[in-house]
Structures are given as structure tokens and as C-alpha cells.
């Protein structure tokens, strides 16, 4: 009796964990992904596309927090040396990508350029983020 209850409990727990780790996009994510794919295939009215709003919000969040990119600034020799003496070689220090934002380019122009760099199919939000970051590295490289 106890073994059958244990098997049922394990089966239920395992099935719930499968549903919890689902990578199926939500309805809102599907709308954004379909919009980005359609804009990449045939750019139409960019102003009303959900993909454009998503990318503009993504840019606003990413570029203001500067988590993955440094906008033409360096930490300085003192901070670099302090980091090396405290951490040493125990970690792999991943260098952020340096971006340079031209003053004559507005967010709408940048969004249009990023969409032009997408390569379909865009099947998940994570893949969309990767493509946005890759396009940023191409379009706004300081070198």
C-alpha cells in the first residue's frame, strides 16, 4: 500500500515539475515573436508593431542598467588592479561589450536597424534577446 502511494506521489511530483519548466511561450510572447518574424520578412508599419515596442522597452532597460554593456566608459586601472588582487584567477572575468551610441541616432532608427539584423526563425524570447544583443554589438560597436 505504501509503495503504491509513494509511486503515485512521485509521479505527480514529476509531472508537475515538467509543467513548471515549460518553455512554451505565453500568448503575449507569441504575439511579440510573430510580430518580429513578420517585420523581419517584410517590414511594414513599424510604429504599431508589438515587436517594436518590446525592443524599445528592452533597450531602455538594458542600456540604462548597463548590465551587459558598458557605454564608452572604463573602470580604471585602480579598480582593475583591486579586482585582480582580491579575486585573482579564480573566476573567468567576462568583459562586457563596449557600445557607442551616436548622438544623431534616435531609438526608432536604432530599433529599425536591429530588426534588420534579425535572422529567422525567432522561436523564443530568449532567442530574441540573444539576437537583440548580437545586433547591438554589430550596430553600436565602438571599434
Image (tube, helix red, strand yellow):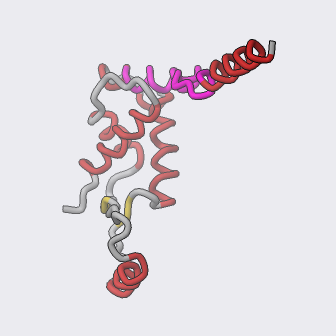
Q: Where is residue 115 in the image (x, y as percent from the top left)?
A: 33, 34
Say which quadrant the C terminus sits in. Answer: bottom left
Say which quadrant the N terminus sits in. Answer: top right
Magenta stretch: dominant SS? helix
Q: In this view, does 35 lie above or below 102?
A: above
Question: Left or right: 103 with respect to 124?
Answer: left
Q: Which residue lies furthest to the left in this view?
A: 143
As rendered, which of 10 and 141 lies closer to the eye? 10
Question: Left or right: 12 with respect to 122?
Answer: right
Image quadrant of residue 34? top left
Q: Is residue 82 above or below residue 18?
A: below
Image quadrant of residue 134? top left
Asked if residue 132 shows in the view, the reply is: yes
Q: Where is residue 39 in the image (x, y as percent from the top left)?
A: 36, 24
- The reply to whether the magenta stretch includes residue 95 is no
Q: Position of residue 11 (x, y in %)?
A: 67, 17
Q: Is residue 70 above or below residue 10?
A: below
Residue depicted at 50% across the width and 36% down the height: 54
Question: Left or right: 17 with respect to 71?
Answer: right
Magenta region, residue range: 18-37
Q: Which residue lies furthest to the right in this view?
A: 1
Asked if residue 102 shows in the view, the reply is: no
Residue depicted at 44% across the width and 35% down the height: 126
Image quadrant of residue 130? top left
Q: Where is residue 50 in the image (x, y as percent from the top left)?
A: 50, 28
- The reply to whether the magenta stretch includes residue 26 is yes
Residue depicted at 41% across the width and 48% down the height: 107
Amino acid at each position: 500500500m505504501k509503495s503504491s502511494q509513494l509511486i503515485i506521489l512521485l509521479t505527480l511530483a514529476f509531472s508537475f515539475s515538467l509543467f513548471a519548466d515549460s518553455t512554451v511561450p505565453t500568448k503575449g510572447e507569441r504575439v511579440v515573436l510573430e510580430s518580429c518574424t513578420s517585420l523581419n520578412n517584410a517590414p511594414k508599419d513599424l510604429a504599431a508593431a508589438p515587436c517594436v515596442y518590446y525592443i524599445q522597452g528592452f533597450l531602455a532597460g538594458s542600456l540604462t542598467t548597463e548590465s551587459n554593456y558598458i557605454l564608452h566608459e572604463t573602470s580604471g586601472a585602480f579598480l582593475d588592479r583591486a579586482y585582480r588582487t582580491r579575486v585573482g584567477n579564480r573566476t573567468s572575468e567576462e568583459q562586457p561589450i563596449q557600445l557607442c551610441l551616436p548622438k544623431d541616432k534616435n531609438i526608432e532608427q536604432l530599433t529599425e536597424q536591429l530588426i534588420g539584423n534579425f535572422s529567422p526563425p525567432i522561436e523564443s524570447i530568449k532567442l530574441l534577446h540573444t539576437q537583440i544583443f548580437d545586433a547591438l554589438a554589430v550596430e553600436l560597436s565602438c571599434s
